[in-house]
Image (cartoon, grey):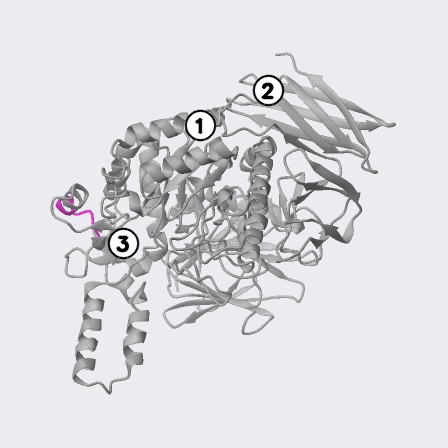
Amino acid sequence: MMLKKAQILNFTKLYRFGQPFKTDAVVRLVDDGGFEPIEAPLITIEGMAVALCKGGIAMTISLSPEDRVYGLGETVGALNKRGKKYRLYTTDDPVHTPDKENLYGSHPFVLVGSALTNPFGFFIDYPSEICLDVGFTNHNVMEVVIPSMNFDIYFIRAEGRTLTFMEIVKEFLLLTGAPYCPPKWAFGYQQSRWSYPDAKSIAETATRFREEGIPCDAIYMDIDYMDNFKVFTVDEEKFPDFATFTGKLKSDGFRVIPIIDPGVKIEDGYGVYEEGRRRGLFCQTRDGSFFKAAVWPGLTHLPDFLMPETRRWWGGLCKKFLDMGVEGFWLDMNEPSIFYTPEAMQEVFNLVDEIKKNPDIPKRRLQDMLNGLSNNRGYFREFYHRTHSGGRISNEEIHNLYGTLMTQGVADGFITNMPGQRYFLLTRSSYVGLHRYAAIWTGDNMSWWEHMIAHIRMLMSLNMAGVFYTGADIGGFGSDVSPELQIRWMQLGVFSPLFRNHSAMGTRRREPWAFDGQALDIMRDTIKLRYALIPYAYSEFMRSVRELSPFIRPLMFDFDCRFDVEDQFMYGGSVMAAPVILPNATGRYVLLPAVSWLYCRASGHSAWTVSVIPPGVHYIDCPLDSTPFFIKENSILTLSEPVNYIGEREIDVLRVAAFVTETASFTYYEDDGLTDGYKKGVYCTIQIDIASAEGQYDISIKAEGAMATKITRIDFEIYDRNAALWRCSRHLYN
């Protein structure tokens, strides 16, 4: 076992086993001269016992009774991962039941510890399957099995001091890079459906939003917009003048977001197929022929995204859409998802022929074979990528990178063809490092109350992995949703960075007007609340990116909280969200840590009922028409009047809602929302400070930055410890 180590960053040690495949997950690289060799057949590193196992390495960590285990990004299960098995191997699985061990992403970053122990973190940089038994077999032991002798593991632990979970995440992001920042309009509401199949249905949907007075910034186009599901095509009968169509929608405040899948239909005369075949850009079988796999278009070839040439080609193909007004894509089926291969289907046909000849053959054999067709693990051992050195490597060995490499190609296409502009890019499959240039959504969830809590848990876990802008399909993608569940999920969506309503073909419609009039009114008010909160959310999101601190995080990141709370979360530094996640509930229990909190029961963007609640466990009333959230004591929330879409008009009046018993501060942030000028310092801030002074308040406002703020007036609503309200206004003179 060849092993060496290096000290990097502030609190991170890298242990290198063998010769790992370069994944580009980290941005802080170590050259060979920076390593110290370790020679031992069996060792313990950073408290983790390391041993050889069949085909790889097994590592074990002892867990104290108090230890919590967090991280792993996109996984099914509790926020505290203890007591379950996980298998990090990207797969398309549309039924996210509690027993599932893996989903679409692989984020092998783990945090371990508690308020009573010294927390630490580790990241295993290995692009294929990693199995973790987190106290499932033995409650006091975590076992990690890597079926390889070639990988990197980064340990984050301080010597002589105790790191907080927040500090561990920051160190991880110093290692892997700062999170992606979408354009500001991406913080608006987004509407999707499988499917709005033509220009007419999308235009009617857009018109209805404006007629109903419901804000919306984007409408998605699922696979039916294509010509027979051929990627990078548009069905000209359904969309006779696509550029004019997208231009008209944009003038009304809607961005159009088409889907892109990796499978390229095998069809003579289809330009993408012809070029990819001619240039040898597709994955191959062992014998050198192009690998065939069936997805939506039928038989396809899969682009070999490991090749830089393929990624440049794929990014260049996006230019056709960018030239027609598209500013964002969502990438799907990129685990990659495979319905079947010709060889596997032939085995089915052979069995059917056997059954015809011998009716006594158990029909269960056929059923099992059909059930095993989709995304069979064996497919990924059958096709190969070409490496930088001219060799070949099977997809199985780097499987978890496929979706990330595809996404990287599209991101590079945006950067090349929209220089200096921010782009919107959403993907389903992901690996660590993708968070630098794209966002993810959590795939095909269901219209189940249980998937609301899954949404909350994944928001927190993915933020720990650096994916700050993320979310789940509001209302659930599959099955039918009740009006109550849709409303409660929309209220959660107010505090989800990605606020997208998406649903599957054949399910009940999810648009706000698809329910009764009462539901429509509540959802309109809920979406307007989201838009009113954007000055706060955008300011805190951009601060989180600059400071490398999770935008959405569990309570124990901010407070010395020894209670396990998995259905509440901090939304930036001032606000705690506590959605109602049970059917027929008109309230819920909440844990309020450390300080007093201003409970805001919002029936719209301005109609709030407020009360001050001391720390502790409390039951709060929250009828169906109200969105519950809390403002932390001595904190500030910034709002504005909602608009129909972000950028409809300049926001010149800022509303401040504050809960102040001593002093409070907030930094409002403003940039153009569309370019990467913020990276060069082209933005402005307004520093707002409030101090309580004998029943009055001293207010300080300071605007500064490389651009002038658009804000001309700030209206203050300040609550004291008795929830008494004090109002005033201040003008800014630029």
Residue 296 disc label: 3
Residue 282 part of the magenta segment: yes
Among the two numbered marks 3 and 2 on one chain, the one whose residue lies closer to the N terminus: 3
Q: Amino acid at mark 3?
A: Trp
Closest to the observer, 568 or 249: 249
Alpha carbons under labels 1 and 3: distance apart: 36 Å
Closest to the observer, 555 or 160: 555
Left or right of 369? Residue 203 is right
Among the two numbered marks 1 and 3 on one chain, the one whose residue lies closer to the N terminus: 3
- Quadrant the N terminus occupies: bottom left
Residue 215 disc label: none
Task: Judge whether residue 112 can be spotted in this image.
Answer: yes
- Quadrant the C terminus occupies: top right
Residue 547 part of the magenta segment: no
Among the two numbered marks 1 and 2 on one chain, the one whose residue lies closer to the N terminus: 2
Residue at 31% from the left image edge and 80% from the top image edge: 364
- Dot 3, how many residues are within 10 Å of its Cα: few (below 14), some (14-19), or many (20+)? some
